[in-house]
Amino acid sequence: MGTGHVMRCLALAQAWQDMGGTVSLLARDLPAALAARCGEEGVTVLPFDPVAPDGEQTAAAEACAAACDVPDCKAVDIDFLSPLRLQDNGRILGPDEIDEARLLNALVRRAYLLIACHADAGFKPEFTALKAGAERVVGERQLCWFQHSRQSNRNPGRSPSGGAGKADIPMSGVIGRWRLTGEIAPFLPYLALGSWTGVGKMAVCGMGMYLLSVAV
């Protein structure tokens, strides 16, 4: 992780702390100076040290679970702060088309790919069992479609006057609250991690970000 990325994370951390939250940073090989700066800002740095797979949960996965403070509960609320863009055959799904299994399977895949790419760990979810389990999770949705786009200089398009201009990049998706109940225990670590990383198409651009809370 580069210095610039850490400093941007600290800016977000400060905003969250101002709202009364606490912050931990999960990082691998963080330079001592940056770790010290995090400490000065009240951010706990958690090591992300991979180990060879041994049939048990890896150190990387354990660090994720510890960092996410996975709740012990029977129901959770997911409040999407930016559009969730789950797709089927390249088409973004609307609020009446998505379901609990699609969301949970997407979270499992994202966690696996992030850990595989950035931790060199032997962590591999039980995909078959989790896919079957996702079908037993039920939800109560209060979701709607949010129309959104951004302009890109890297992908020139046509301006309204007909000349060359900036291209509109579609970023529309689903926002709102989604309550999950049923057999959610196996998915709690993935839900918690997803609240940090986002989920769905264009998560790297901030799409699919949500707050996770215990349902009451």
Image: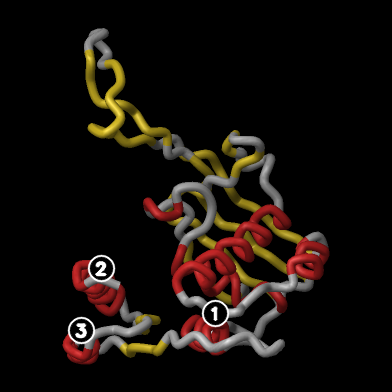
Name the mark nearer the viewer: 3 or 1.
Answer: 1
Relative horizontal placement of residue 106, taking residue 117 as reference (left or right): right
Q: How far apart are marks 1 and 2 (CA)?
A: 22 Å
| Residue under label 1 | 121
Question: Which residue type does callout 1 highlight?
Answer: Ala
Relative horizontal placement of residue 55, taking residue 198 as reference (left or right): right
Residue 113: name its quadrant: bottom right
Q: Position of residue 187 (x, y in %)?
A: 67, 72
Question: Which residue type does callout 3 highlight?
Answer: Leu
Name the mark nearer the viewer: 1 or 2.
Answer: 1
**Residue 130 visible (yes or no):** yes
Is there a contact, CB below 8 Å, between mark 3 and mark 1?
no
Residue at 43%, 51% in the rendered image: 207
Relative horizontal placement of residue 16, taking residue 64 as reference (left or right): left
Q: How crowded is mark 1: few (under 14 residues within 10 Å), some or many (20 or more)?
A: many
Q: Return the residue nearer the eye: 147 or 35.
A: 35
Q: How far apart are marks 3 and 1 (CA)?
A: 24 Å
| Residue under label 3 | 34
Residue at 81%, 60% in the rendered image: 135
Quadrant of the snapshot with the C terminus = bottom right
Q: First in sequence: mark 1 or mark 2? A: 2
Q: Residues within 10 Å of mark 2 (few under 14, many from 20)?
A: few
Helix, strand or loop status at disc 2: helix
Is there a contact, CB below 8 Å, between mark 3 and mark 2?
no
**Residue 212 visible (yes or no):** no
Helix, strand or loop status at disc 1: loop
Label at residue 5:
2
* Residue closest to the far top: 162
